Image (cartoon, rainbow, N blue to C red):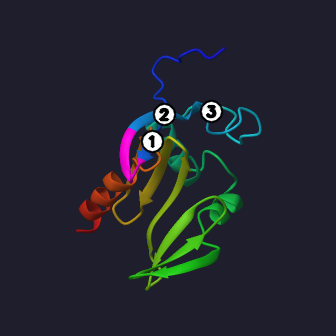
């Protein structure tokens, strides 16, 4: 049986007809209930911010592993003015002079999206959660404009 969980936003996905949204369907049956890496875990924006702070403050990993975790490892692609680089769980955007523009972790599934992003130069951490697959991208673009002008 499926029961509602209080204070938990549930994901929704749009139903389309001729490229128009004609309704919404709950995402609970979009993926099988077993075999998912999150195992039904819930996280708030505050949880995501704490996760992003923990390694930087030395609360999660050893000094050596923290350094590895917070170091870009493999170049993925070049963007306008920065390089997108993968690390051990995080994605880094590295400026041409080697400084970090930002680093983040995002997650997307049918009916849900989330991101936690840290801007080192400004010492700002942002977490966004949405109960739609594309819900975070518009607000994140606006935040990026506020941070970088």
Label 1 packing within 10 angstroms: few (<14), some (14-19), many (20+): few
Query: Under tag 2, what secondary structure?
Result: strand
- Residue corresponding to mark 1: 15
Quadrant containing the N terminus in the rendered view: top right
- Residue corresponding to mark 3: 29
Q: Which residues lie in the magenta part?
A: 17-22
- Residue corresponding to mark 2: 25
Task: Classify 8 as above or below 84.
Answer: above
Q: Residue at the spot x=68%, y=51% of the render?
A: 61
User: Tag on residue 56?
Assistant: none
Q: CA distance from mark 2 to mark 3?
A: 10 Å
Asked if the residue at tag 1 contacts the one at tag 3, i.e. Cβ–Cβ closer than 8 Å, the answer is no
Left or right position of 132 against 51: left
Asked if the residue at tag 1 contacts the one at tag 2, i.e. Cβ–Cβ closer than 8 Å, the answer is yes
Q: Position of residue 24 (x, y in %)?
A: 43, 35
Where residue 29 sits, quadrant-wise, is top right
């Amino acid at each position: 049986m499926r029961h509602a969980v209080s204070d938990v936003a549930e994901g929704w996905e749009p139903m389309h007809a001729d490229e128009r949204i004609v309704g919404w369907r709950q995402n609970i049956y979009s993926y099988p209930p077993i075999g998912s890496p999150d195992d039904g875990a819930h996280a708030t924006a505050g949880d995501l911010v704490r996760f992003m702070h923990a390694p930087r403050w030395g609360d999660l990993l050893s000094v050596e592993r923290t350094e590895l975790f917070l170091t870009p490892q493999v170049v993925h692609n070049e963007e306008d003015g920065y390089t997108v680089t993968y690390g051990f769980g995080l994605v880094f955007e590295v400026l041409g002079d080697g400084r970090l523009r930002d680093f983040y972790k995002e997650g997307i599934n049918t009916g849900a999206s989330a991101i936690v992003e840290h801007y080192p130069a400004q010492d700002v951490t942002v977490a966004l959660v949405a109960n739609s697959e594309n819900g975070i991208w518009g607000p994140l673009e606006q935040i990026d404009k506020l941070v970088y002008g």
